[in-house]
């Protein structure tokens, strides 16, 4: 049964409303800061799985809006990026970037070692590492094709899709509980600091807050987003096949950064409330569509060795966030939010990391530095570093 683009949009909207209502009514979901798109999206994905198993009817939602919504979200990240603010957060950005890089390496080491221990091709360990977890569906699909064509790895594409699906789910589920655990480790002085800065929230920190805007500001922002999408696709097409080829969403974000700071130099200030409104709506709808379209049965079909490696990768992410990310980033509230975000980045995707941060800050209070650096690292630096890490591992003698 195929559901068209309008039906899919209605379903995604209902998924978000369902998630919000359940979070209001179920204390467990509030306590552990589970994002609304994750709650509603997983319920729909499970319902689709049950329908498929009981009646052999496969429900398919239209994906036409999913990529444009993702690109619109990344364009608003760029349109919100102030170079002066990014410069002020430079030392923290570099430190967190080093942590992100460390996790990418650790994921591949764990994957390869477990592949040897379980007696399977070490390429499977690499595939169930940073390729599909930090890289997501796009990176997983691209590298699985390489592994199949050049290394003869069987079922690489199916495994990559299943692992990326698992990561997207766990990235959204793990962040909240990790944040709750770490909140117990911060002192009373830090809790008071959070309260003192609540009046100075950034535009993406409170997705449920009313954003005052006007039709003119809304239309202007929508036009700027359209410029980012159009120019970003042109840049991505121009870089395709070159040594500096980049994903479209990175190019879209880059155009947004240039546009925002270029207009600022000319004395034109964007209506950031309108940017926040459109950005948060795009993010929520994208995540709802992504999660409700998950083919959960693909997880059940994963081979036992792959499932074992995924379980170990989940444990690695939790341990890394608690014992590496949190203390390295300062053992304060910002470190809590960054640790929750790292769960989204390390297992899911940048939108998942943002959703984790919003769920945590909505419950405990704002974290300016987290919302300043995570979008830029997740959307720009992480893909580049992951590509370098993957190629370095593939250069090892065990793969030749």
Image (cartoon, rainbow, N blue to C red):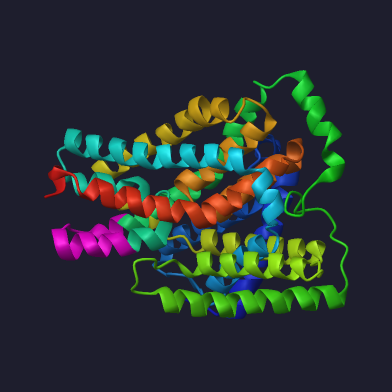
Q: Is residue 288 magenta?
A: no
At x 14%, y 58%, the residue is: 151
Q: From this view, report whether residue 271 is shown above or below residue 31.
A: below
Viewer-closest of 255 and 355:
255
At x 76%, y 66%, the residue is: 264
For residue 71, side relative to residue 240 (left or right): right
At x 66%, y 40%, the residue is: 33
Q: From this view, report whether residue 142 is shown above or below residue 195.
A: below
For residue 250, side relative to residue 207 (left or right): left
Q: Position of residue 149 (x, y in %)?
A: 17, 66
Count of numbered badges drawn on the protein: 0
Quarter assignment of residue 273: bottom right
Report the magenta stretch's main SS.
Answer: helix
Q: Position of residue 318 (x, y in %)?
A: 48, 32
Quarter assignment of residue 370: top right
Q: Is residue 149 magenta?
A: yes
The magenta stretch spans which residues? 142-159
For residue 45, side relative to residue 386 (left or right): right
Viewer-closest of 35 and 212:
212
At x 30%, y 35%, the residue is: 110
Viewer-closest of 170 and 203:
203
Quarter assignment of residue 190: top right
């Amino acid at each position: 049964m195929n559901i068209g683009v309008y039906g899919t949009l209605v379903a995604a909207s209902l998924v978000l409303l369902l998630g919000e209502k359940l979070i209001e009514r179920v204390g467990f979901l509030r306590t552990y800061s589970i994002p609304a798109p994750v709650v509603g999206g997983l319920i729909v994905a499970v319902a689709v799985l049950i329908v498929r198993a009981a009646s052999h009817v496969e429900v398919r939602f239209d994906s036409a809006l999913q990529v444009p919504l993702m690109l619109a979200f990344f364009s608003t990240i760029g349109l919100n990026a102030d170079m002066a603010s990014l410069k002020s957060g430079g030392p923290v950005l570099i430190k967190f970037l080093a942590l992100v890089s460390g996790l990418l390496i650790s994921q591949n080491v764990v994957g390869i070692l477990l592949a040897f221990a379980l007696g399977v091709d070490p390429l499977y360990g690499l595939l169930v590492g940073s390729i599909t977890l930090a890289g997501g569906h796009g990176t997983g699909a691209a590298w699985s094709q390489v592994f199949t064509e050049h290394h003869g790895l069987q079922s690489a594409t199916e495994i990559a899709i299943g692992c990326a699906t698992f990561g997207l789910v766990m990235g959204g589920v793990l962040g909240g509980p990790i944040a709750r655990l770490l909140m117990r480790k911060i002192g009373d002085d830090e809790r008071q600091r959070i309260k003192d800065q609540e009046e100075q929230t950034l535009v993406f920190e409170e997705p449920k807050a009313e954003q005052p805007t006007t039709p003119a500001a809304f239309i202007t922002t929508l036009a700027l987003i359209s410029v980012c999408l159009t120019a970003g696709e042109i840049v991505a097409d121009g870089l395709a096949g070159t040594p500096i080829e980049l994903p479209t969403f990175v190019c879209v974000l880059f155009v947004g950064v240039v546009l925002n700071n270029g207009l600022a130099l000319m004395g034109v200030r964007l209506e950031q409330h309108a940017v926040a409104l459109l950005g948060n709506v795009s993010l929520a709808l994208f995540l709802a569509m992504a999660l409700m379209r998950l083919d959960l049965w693909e997880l059940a079909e994963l081979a036992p060795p792959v499932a074992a490696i995924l379980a170990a990768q989940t444990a690695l992410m939790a341990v890394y966030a608690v014992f590496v990310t949190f203390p390295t980033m300062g053992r304060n509230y910002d470190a809590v939010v960054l640790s929750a975000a790292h769960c989204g980045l390390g297992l899911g995707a940048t939108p998942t990391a943002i959703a984790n941060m919003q769920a945590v800050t909505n419950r405990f209070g704002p974290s300016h530095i987290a919302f300043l650096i995570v979008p830029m690292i997740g959307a720009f630096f992480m893909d580049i570093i992951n590509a370098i890490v993957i190629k370095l591992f593939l250069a090892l003698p065990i793969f030749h």
